[in-house]
Image (tube, grey):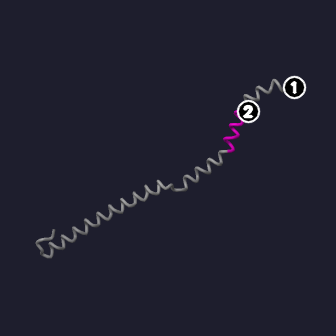
Amino acid sequence: MKTRILMVAPLMLLVLPGCVRTVASVVTAPVRAGSQVVDWTTTSQDEADRNYGRKMRKQEARDGKAAKKAEKERRKQCREAGYDNCG
């Protein structure tokens, strides 16, 4: 019996590290999946800053277009009123 254990022991040492690694990956898989879901559902500060900057640039572009349109309309009304110096 002891000789059989002594013969099988070296083989087990070759097989068990793979099993331990597999068991460890199976055990940690739900934790990794959960952290990935949290990462997908939350917004980091960097992402929030980037999104805010994009939003502000779009707002500034809209404001600029509206200001140009208002100035053009003001000049048009000034010329229609008959004023010479509308600039």
Task: State the extent of the magenta-drawn residues as a range.
Answer: 17-27
Numbered circles on residues, count: 2
Q: Dot 1 lies on which element?
A: helix
Q: Residue at x 15, y 76 (%)?
A: 81
Q: Amino acid at mark 2?
A: Leu
To which residue does mark 1 refer?
A: 2
Label 2 neighbour load within 10 Å: few <14, some 14-19, many 20+: few
Q: Quarter of the image containing the C terminus?
A: bottom left
Q: Amino acid at mark 1?
A: Lys
- Vertical relation: 27 (above or below) 64: above
What is the x, y in percent for residue 15?
Answer: 73, 30
Q: Residue at x 18, y 73 (%)?
A: 77
* Most foreground residue, 6 or 36: 6
Q: Are marks 1 and 2 in contact (CB under 8 Å)?
A: no
Q: Quadrant of residue 7?
A: top right
Q: Quarter of the image containing the N terminus?
A: top right
What is the x, y in percent for residue 13?
Answer: 75, 29
Q: Residue at x 51, y 55 (%)?
A: 44
Residue 40: in magenta span: no
Q: Quadrant of residue 67?
A: bottom left
Q: Label for residue 70?
A: none
What is the x, y in percent for residue 79?
Answer: 14, 72
- Vertical relation: 15 (above or below) 61: above
To which residue does mark 2 refer?
A: 16
- Vertical relation: 67 (above or below) 6: below
Residue 18: in magenta span: yes
Pick whichever of labels 1 and 2 is earlier in the sequence: 1
Q: Seen in the image, is 74 located left or right of residue 85?
A: right
Label 1 neighbour load within 10 Å: few <14, some 14-19, many 20+: few
